[in-house]
Amino acid sequence: MRAWIDRHRDSLVFALSMTAVALGVLVSWRHGVLSSAWLEKNKDVVSAACNLVGAAVLVLGAIASYLRFFRGRTLSLRAELALAVSTHPTTDGVVLHAVTLTARNVGNATIWNPVPQMTLEVHGPPDTVASEVISNWSEETARVAGFVPVIEPGETVMFFAVRRIPVSAWAVAYGATLRADRGDTWHTSRMVSNPQPDAEKD
């Protein structure tokens, strides 16, 4: 029921408003506040009031249309995130995971002060299970984020980080979030298999 009300909220508000106006007119007519003689005597006032109400309805409709369609779609912030992870075995008992988060502004408005954050969850034997939040990116990424704190429409920005994952881990789940200063957020995730020494020998 709540979901149905949320979907039809605008229609319900309009219907209830019209019902309230109609009831107000009926009550006024019944108690003699409104009558044919009064309407005939004050027809100029009634006409002016109708014009004012019509103008107010047009203004409110224009504002509602702007908020719902123009501002809500044309000027809304939109971004596409892509998460790429490459694995690189080593002789040190770990696998290097090179993580690249790509953010592309596909909207018509500038994304100001984009803040990327990534979480990783290591899956494997009990001694390798771990979770971590990646907030420190590479030096190049820090330079870009520090001096160019915007993503212009059509522009793409990349964030890069490297993590050392135990070779005994089975897989790593990555989840990335990009947050704009207006509060808009975008998410993407990916599960990456960790190369196993036994699998490589086969």
Image: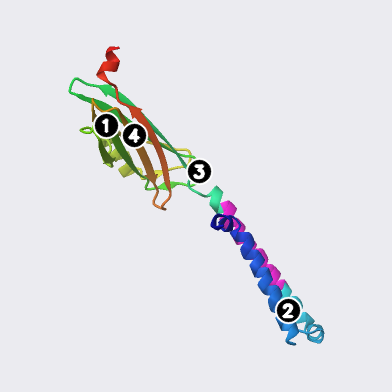
Tell which tag, 4 or 3, sits nearer the viewer: 4
- The residue shown at (56%, 57%) is 1
Which is nearer the N-term, disc 2 or disc 4?
Answer: 2
Residue closest to the far left: 92
Could you tell me residue 62's position as x and y percent?
63, 60
Q: Is residue 60 visible?
A: no
Q: Secondary structure at mark 2?
A: helix
Could you tell me residue 22's position as x and y percent?
71, 74
Per the rendering, the mark at residue 67 is none
What residue did someone put label 2 on? Answer: 26
- The residue shown at (76%, 76%) is 47
Which is nearer the N-term, disc 2 or disc 1?
Answer: 2
What residue did someone put label 4 on? Answer: 173
What residue did someone put label 1 on? Answer: 162
Query: In the image shown, does 97 or 141 lie closer to the viewer?
Result: 97
Instruction: Please rate how many residues cluster around mark 3, counting C-alpha atoms within 10 Å: few if below 14, some from 14 to 19, many from 20.
Output: some
